[in-house]
Amino acid sequence: MNDQELLIQRFLDHDLTPDERVAFLRAVDADATLRRHWLNLETVVTETAHLPRLAPSPRFLSELKTRIVSTVPSWWARWWTAVTAPRTLEWNFAGAVAAACVVIVAAAGLLSARPERVVEVPVAVAPTQTIAAGLKQEPTVFVRLVLLQPGARSVSVAGDFNGWNPAHTPLERSDGGMWTATIPLKPGRYQYMFVIDGKQWIADPLAAEAETDGFGARNAVLDVDI
């Protein structure tokens, strides 16, 4: 990892001081290659947050419970352990009579004991729903907009993607007076402007292109592609 990649990583992890963040944004403004590399990493971070979380299947949970739950020994195993356990006996007539009674009672219990009948009940399983893999979805690109305005009370963006309504896309303020917003866009070409405190409209100083709006002002241009 070179110095530029390390600096971008620290910026994304919020490890930079306010002065370092301002210096980084100025470097991004001056270096188009650094700006594109940074925006690509911002896109990766944003899309990673939207990845689905995989849940374990019911079969996996059932097998796991079967392995970790200790097995309770049956009454036959407990009785056999008690009978076959080595011990020292003192022989006398009363003890012999008591032992014979125990053997007779145990034999009667074995003869009367019958295994319980296990009944298997079929369970209806709902058919799984299969999603057609052939359906083609229109791709979406997450675009990160950044504006350095330490003295602003509010910043929003208006453009082709939101009907030129700044109320639809406000930016969030972070350290060092930087305002940011991440918006999902379809591939295409968009014009937009930032709105400061609800009244001052300015073009994005980081935009690579600009076009006139027909009224004497120039709008920033954003090309979104895959």
Image: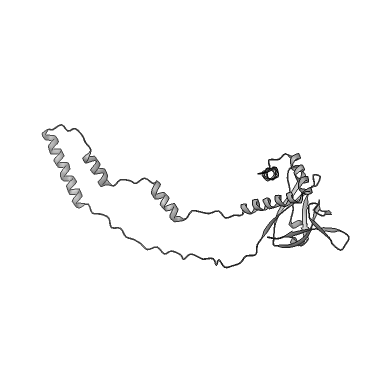
Question: Which of the image's four quarters has the N terminus?
Answer: top right
Q: Residue at x 76, y 56 (%)?
A: 167
Q: Measured along the vertical axis of the image, is residue 153 above or below residue 139?
A: above
On the image, the x and y values in percent for residue 52 come to 57, 55
Residue 48 in sight in this render: yes
Residue 165 in sight in this render: no
In the image, taking residue 58 as reference, residue 226 lies left or right, namely: right
Question: Which of the image's four quarters has the C terminus?
Answer: bottom right
Q: Measured along the vertical axis of the image, is residue 31 above or below residue 164?
A: above
Q: Which residue is drawn at 26% across and 43% down?
A: 78
On the image, the x and y values in percent for residue 173 come to 74, 47
Q: Which residue is drawn at 30% across and 58% down?
A: 118
On the image, the x and y values in percent for residue 211 come to 83, 60
In this view, the residue in front, 127 or 147, is: 147
In the image, taking residue 201 as reference, residue 60 lies left or right, namely: left
Which residue is at the far right? 216
In the image, taking residue 156 as reference, residue 104 lies left or right, namely: left
On the image, the x and y values in percent for residue 132 come to 55, 67
Which residue is at the far front? 2
- Residue 7, by quadrant, is top right
In this view, the residue in front, 215 or 32, is: 32
In this view, the residue in front, 16 or 194, is: 16
- Residue 189, by quadrant, is bottom right
In the image, taking residue 43 as reference, residue 82 lies left or right, namely: left
> How many discs appear?
0
Q: Which residue is drawn at 80% across and 57% down?
A: 209
Color style of the picture: one colour
